Image (cartoon, rainbow, N blue to C red):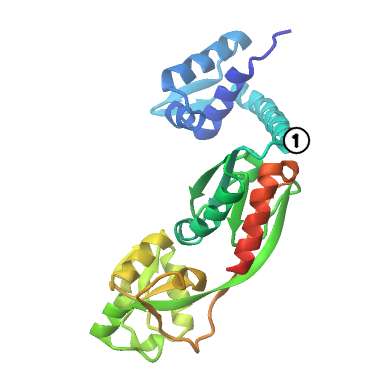
Amino acid sequence: MTEIDWNRARAFLATAEAGSLSAAARKLGLTQPTLSRQVAALEAELAVLLFERIGKKLVLTEAGDSLLQHARAMGEAALAMSFAASGRAEAIEGRVTISATDGNAAYVLPEIVARIRREAPQVTLVIIASNSLSDLQRREADIAIRHVRPEGDNLIGRLVRESTAHFYAASSWLARNGHPKSPADVAPHDFIGYEQSERFAELMRGIGTRATVDGFRLVSESSAVVWEMVKRGLGVGLMSREIALRTEGVVELFPDLEPPRFPVWLVTHRELRTSRRIRLVYEILAEELGRV
């Protein structure tokens, strides 16, 4: 019976999931020729063709498709072993990866990171600033700050607080346009929108504006970009209160308006909570985020 080399199986799994050698190589931190050689070696080892090229795409053969579930099982077993080893690490040193939205990563986390650095100077913190949910079960991050309840049997989460979002403008914008009494007094093109424009427009219409998707003249998927534009007086933006309170030169426009509310969850993998370094970072994050 042929013993499968895990590195080759991992190369096959990454290529099948990414759909191309280049994307899989980036994911694994390998060069494309190295990855290609590993896949070819696995094909030779198993005496089967795993992929066929159709145009510019790699497509699984029937044999490759049937073997994919076994490669995934190997991947899950390797991850479980990694989690178990990380969870039993006693030293307060090593890497801890924190995933957060770009706004929280840029404006809220630095203060908290300063405390972690004081209390655990040997820990290396890796901050992932992304508005996509990191897959903790696939070890894309050790800890995530999310606005949705965690799902998955192996994840544990703590609801640290509820946050609110409000409308703000820079003093320079107010000097040019005056202080509006309600959102309806702001021209639709003066609102800075988010990439999910229809959803944002629906929210805006719900508070009495005439907003349409085509009405926004500035749009970004990044809350940090939106906030920087607000700070520079380019328009009116919606931002969480904890970020606005850390910013000079911006004014809340409609304090009597009922604000949108959203939860702040702190999530990690169950196995990782037994790691001293991850547990320490998790508890500091929970304490400081609850205090924000």
Along the horizontal axis of the image, is 190 left or right of 65? left
Rendered position, 273 above or below 16: below
User: How far across and how far down the image is residue 39, in percent?
Assistant: 53, 17
Seen at 63% across and 27% down, the residue is: 68
Which of the 4 image quarters holds residue 42? top right
Pick the front one: 67 or 207: 207
Residue that label 1 marks:
88
Q: The N terminus appears in which quarter of the rendering?
A: top right
Residue 112 pos. (x, y %)? 55, 57
Depth order, front residue of 38/288: 288
Q: Secondary structure at mark 1?
A: loop
Quadrant assignment, res 237: bottom left
Identify which residue is drawn at 52% across, 52% down: 132
Placement of 12 over or under 41, stated as above or below: below
Residue 82 versus residue 280: which sits nearer the camera? 280
Where residue 208 appears, as percent x and y from the top left, is: 44, 86
Q: Report the side of 122 relative to 230 (left or right).
A: right
Res 264 seen here: no
Is 265 located above or below residue 141 in the figure? below
**Residue shown at 41% from the left, 67% from the top:** 197
Viewer can see residue 85 = yes
- Residue 64, position in %: x, y? 60, 23
